[in-house]
Image (spheres, rainbow, N blue to C red):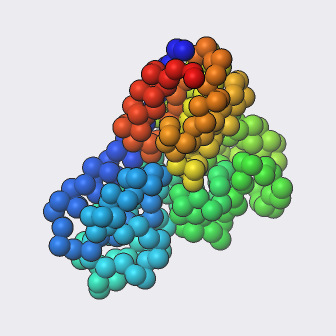
Amino acid sequence: MEVEIAKDIGFCFGVRKAIESLEKVVDEYSEEEIYVTGELIHNKDAIKKYEESNVKFSQNIDEYNGIVVIRAHGISDEEREKIKSNPNVKKIIDTTCPYVLRVHYLTKKMVKEGYHIIIIGEKDHPETRGYYLNVKDNSTVIEPSVGIKELPKVKKVAVFAQTTMNYEKFKEIVKELVTEFDETRIFMTICTPVINRQKSVVELSKECDLMVVLGGYNSSNTKKLRDLCAKYTKAVHVERISQLNPEILKGKRKVGIAAGTSTPDWIIQEAYEFLKNYAPS
């Protein structure tokens, strides 16, 4: 059985930067309480490792104390100010992804210029939630899985995407939107690593009998990759290769491996070694 890993795989630079920053914080502030504004990566084993190093992952700002690390997903301005004003917080380390910061800047800029903001993304995802909270009086969220249900009665809109959303789905929704308003400005805010990753898994999926997609079950971009692979071949989403039912491998000629942007390299390598050494019983 042939096994191939997708060309673009593993941590994106935003997640890698966030992890490197947290590692540094753990080393430098070992005596302090360390809080992260939610899960840094969608991997239970990695989260457990950090928790054993006195790191707490929480979205409850009121309980923050000591050192606070803002994860790659970012937070709203209101949440940021609340953390800054907390007398128990000694230091803030901001690891917000540059792509996310750009969307925060642009959405606020376009509101000042008189545009209503349309965000295409998952309403409950922390990234989309951060954008929405900053411009909530002048914004609408369209969830890709739901599509366009009700549009604001305005003349000018500026359209943005959650940085990890499916590129083809974004184009599909935008195509519907452009005819609904007097003026529609489109900002392509899906990050380049996500687009490259989606393209590479499509190419590999077309060559494989099975795609194994590695990543947390609560990882938005991993779920999107699985759905994308499933358009071309059989696809299964697991957090670790040990969760894969070996029966699914029987008779397979070629198996591909894809992974979300917060899947550690060692999990990818573990899966590759298992699949390469697989021998049907």
Residue sitting at x 39%, y 42%: 264
Residue 150 in which image quadrant: bottom right
Towards the viewer: 137 or 28: 28
| Quadrant of image for the N terminus | top right
Q: Is residue 133 left or right of residue 14?
A: right
The structure residue drawn at horizontal position 61% and vertical position 14%, both measured from the top left corner, is: 253
The relative height of residue 275 versus residue 22 in the rendered view (above or below) is above
Give the vertical position of 208 relative to 171 (above or below): above
Residue beneath the point at 76% across and 56% down: 155
Whether residue 182 is visible to the viewer of this picture, yes or no, is no
**Residue 87 on image: x %, y %:** 29, 85
Is residue 76 found left or right of 26 in the rendered image?
right
Q: Quadrant of residue 207?
A: top right
Q: Quadrant of the C terminus?
A: top right
Residue 103 placement (x, y as % from top left): 51, 52
Query: Which one is in front, 262 or 77?
Result: 262
> In the image, residue 117 lies at what x, y percent?
65, 57
- Residue at the (52%, 20%) spot, across then down: 279
| Front residue (pair 278, 222) | 278
Q: What number of labels is visible?
A: 0
Viewer-nearest residue: 238 or 204:
238
On the image, the x and y values in percent for residue 99 come to 45, 46
Q: Is residue 32 visible?
A: yes
